[in-house]
Amino acid sequence: MKQIYLDNQSNTRLDERVFDSMKPFFIEYYGNPQSIYSLGTISKDALESARCKVASLINADAGEIIFTSCGSESNNLAIKGVAEALKANGRHIIVSSIEHFSILNSVRRLEKEGFEVDSVPVDNKGNINELKLKEMLRKDTILVSVQYANPEIGTIQNIKKLVSIVKQSQNISDFVVFHTDAVSACGTIPVDVKDLGVDTLTFSASAIHGPRGAAALYINRGLKIIPQIDGGVQENSKRSGTENIPAIVGFGKACEIAKEELVSKSRFICKLRDRLISGLLNKVECIYLNGPQAQENRLPGNVNFSIEFIEGEALFLLLDAKGVMVGSGSACASKDLKLSHVLRAINVDVVIGQGSIVFTLSKFNTEKEMEYVLEEFPSIVKRLRDMSPLYSYFVQTGKKKVAGLGANFDEHCHCDL
């Protein structure tokens, strides 16, 4: 059976060149990089070489990169580590309403420890409400965290402008840390920490065809942060634990490849994305795109649709039976088919949102695969709608608005009755 993987926001296929770079460090060069004998020195050199490659992807200095095990760990270190380091200056934190759960649950934990957290809203395309952000800034604000690009609806934030709003505000104290979760952005779109002005930034190997088990936190030189793992002196004493050298070496190689292929890969994936979007809009009735339009600030590989009159769970299962693997939202919530917090934040109607589906594309997808999806998808939707009493009522009455449909239904509905 044909297998088409379109859930690259949850994990990406390992690039064979990355795997080749990792192999020697599993069996041949297995020394601990903290050891001073030759086998350890080889691992230490590989560790620092990878650090330089990872730093280069985001135009950081190698000494500003801290290796972690995953994006969630990096986010936890950034949020909790900064909050603990700066709590004497204030206890107010601002995050966006569409952050990853590793951010939202970190600040929830901090609230239990006496911190105050405000959530800045987004518009119906997922863009940060800049006016609300300005209004939320206070003298005791110590940390602002806004995701660079949302993996569910594809929205790319203007981080440079948001940093400027925060840093130039007259309402804040002398120093506020700006963090961005850039897991979905780095290696996909250009990211330059010096140009952005961010203080901390999260990115991960698994999002750019690297191995799981390696990620990084960029920490602007001189910024104080409290470690969240107590132990030894690894990672400049900011993240203890024996380094996962094979994964880190693979991360470095993945960053090197991503930097080389950034422009060509983005152009190719955008072409696939636009074909899938236009094809589904033309072939399936009563369907609309969540997030920005493709020509706007949308991730190259992101396609998020809500399809009216169907349930998402049945849609995923029937697609899987055809060999097409897709997502339902956040990778950490894909088994929970309730309306995601991201779709709620952009005011998608709860009834419409039950039929939401996320395609995330990569450089390993092909035009032929997009055509296969466009061939199979409409018949699957028809099969499910044939069992829907709501759709039957809709067809019989010709009414475009039935109980539960959102205000934007007419704008996006493509029903030819």
Image (cartoon, rainbow, N blue to C red):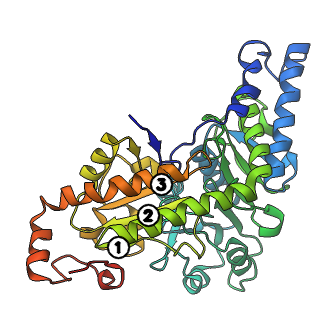
Where disc 1 sits, the SS reads loop
Q: Is label 1 or label 3 in front?
A: 3
- Count residues near mark 3 (Cα–Cα under 10 Å), then give few for <14, some for 14-19, many for 20+: some
Image quarter in which the N terminus is found: top left
Mark closer to the chain start, 3 or 2: 2
Question: Looking at the image, which is closer to me, 353 or 147?
Answer: 353
Which amino acid, by three-letter code, is at mark 2?
A: Asn
Residue 85: quadrant of the picture: bottom right
Mark 3 and mark 2 in contact? Answer it, CB < 8 Å.
no
Vertical comparison of 113 with 22: above or below: below
Q: Residue at x 38, y 40 (%)?
A: 323
x and y percent of residue 8 in the render?
A: 53, 48
User: Disc 2 marks which residue?
Assistant: 304
x and y percent of residue 202 in the render?
A: 67, 52
Where disc 2 sits, the SS reads strand
Q: Residue at x 43, y 57 (%)?
A: 358
x and y percent of residue 147 in the render?
A: 59, 63
Vertical comparison of 91 with 52: above or below: below
User: Disc 3 marks which residue?
Assistant: 370
Label 1, label 2: how many angstroms apart (C-alpha)? 12 Å
Q: Is label 3 or label 2 in front?
A: 3
Which amino acid, by three-letter code, is at mark 3?
A: Met
29 on left or right of 374: right
User: Disc 1 marks which residue?
Assistant: 348
Question: Looking at the image, which is closer to me, 268 or 122?
Answer: 268
Mark closer to the chain start, 1 or 3: 1
Label 1, label 3: how many angstroms apart (C-alpha)? 26 Å
Question: Looking at the image, which is closer to me, 282 or 67?
Answer: 282
Where disc 3 sits, the SS reads helix
- Count residues near mark 2 (Cα–Cα under 10 Å), then give few for <14, some for 14-19, many for 20+: many
Is residue 241 in sight in this rendering? no
Vertical comparison of 28 with 106: above or below: above
